[in-house]
Image (tube, rainbow, N blue to C red):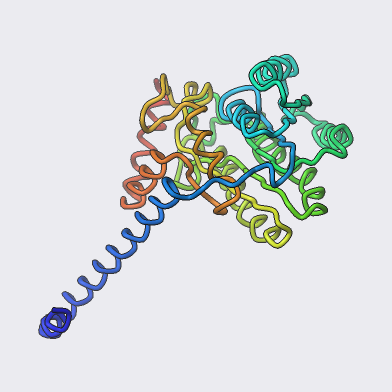
Amino acid sequence: MLSTCFIHLKTQPLWIIILSLLGFLSIVKNTIFLLKWIFIKIFRKPKNLKNYGSWALITGSTDGIGKAFAFQLAKKGLNLILVSRNLSKLKNVSSEIRAKYPNTLTKIFGIEFSGPNISARIIEMKEDIKGLDVGVLINNVGVTYPSAMFFHEVDEEIWMNLVRVNVGGTSLITRGIIEEMVARKKGAIVNIGSGASIVVPSHPLYAIYAATKAYIDQLSRCLYVEYKHYGIDVQCQVPLYVSTKMASTVAFVEKPSIFIPSAGKYVESAIESIGYEARCTPYWGHSIQWWFASLLPSAVLDAWRLSTGIHRRVA
């Protein structure tokens, strides 16, 4: 059978042979992708996060994905260091967690990530948590535009705020925590990226936001390589739309759906991915959307995102 196919191919023009080969390679590639996806989503066991340490630190932990991470990590038996700018909300979240998980210890620390004293506050935080076995760091803090805007329309204070929070905040927190992980030779760091910088080739009318998330992706990959031999697993998680306050404001997401999970549903998948790939899309519906996007030409995706951005700008 196989030999007959080869004999038949030899009689065909070169261009048909090349197309057949490319088609075969495409089938093999997508089959491998499918088998790997099934293994990860169904059969791969999540890591025991307590092996990294008994405490987890979560930034942006008062709403959305960050708050959901806090509850899920408490459910896994970790104690929590909750970091955000609003001290009142931090106290409320801490109380909610301790009411549901009485054995969970919590510490709260207020940091204004867009403020001028972020470095000093992180030094204070390091002193406050000194001696705690912080094994998991979730860098979730992040901001975006108040609405879709062309680049020249973005006020300088808005884009500087994005850089301070999304780039500076994540970098400084990671720098402050990773040293102790190196000393203990174990740890897991999760940086929350965005499909805006990875899944699609461009994200027009949110250019600076997408650029800051591209920084997060590249930072994560570099740190993954740098610190793997120290026993530290660094990962960039790439969600698409999740039903949160931010998504509601900028993308008019009104309620969860099969492809737009709630923060809780997303984090259930995200927790199971910690400690594995350098970059991943934990929620199954998002990974399917990413796969379909990968089949489309960049020009098509660019036109779609531009049209979407302009629609949101005038909505």
In this figure, what is the number of numbered marks? 0
Q: Is residue 146 above or below residue 32?
A: above
Residue 47 picture location, percent across and down = 59, 47
Placement of the N terminus among the 4 image quadrants: bottom left
Placement of the C terminus among the 4 image quadrants: top left
Image quadrant in which you'd find residue 157:
top right
Q: Is residue 88 left or right of residue 144?
A: right
Evaluate whether residue 200 shows in this view. no
Q: Is residue 46 above or below residue 95?
A: below
- For image coordinates 66% across by 38% down, the residue present is 139
- For image coordinates 76% across by 48% down, the residue present is 178
Q: Is residue 16 left or right of residue 136?
A: left
Q: Nearer the viewer, residue 210 or 70?
A: 70
Q: Nearer the viewer, residue 206 or 111?
A: 111
Evaluate whether residue 117 shows in this view. yes
Residue 275 picture location, percent across and down = 60, 50
- Return the residue found at the far front: 103
Q: Is residue 101 above or below residue 287?
A: above
- For image coordinates 67% across by 59% down, the residue present is 228
- For image coordinates 76% across by 26% down, the residue present is 105
Q: Is residue 134 left or right of residue 283?
A: right
Q: Nearer the viewer, residue 22 or 102?
A: 102
Q: Nearer the viewer, residue 159 or 64?
A: 64
Residue 188 picture location, percent across and down = 67, 47
Residue 39 picture location, percent across and down = 42, 52
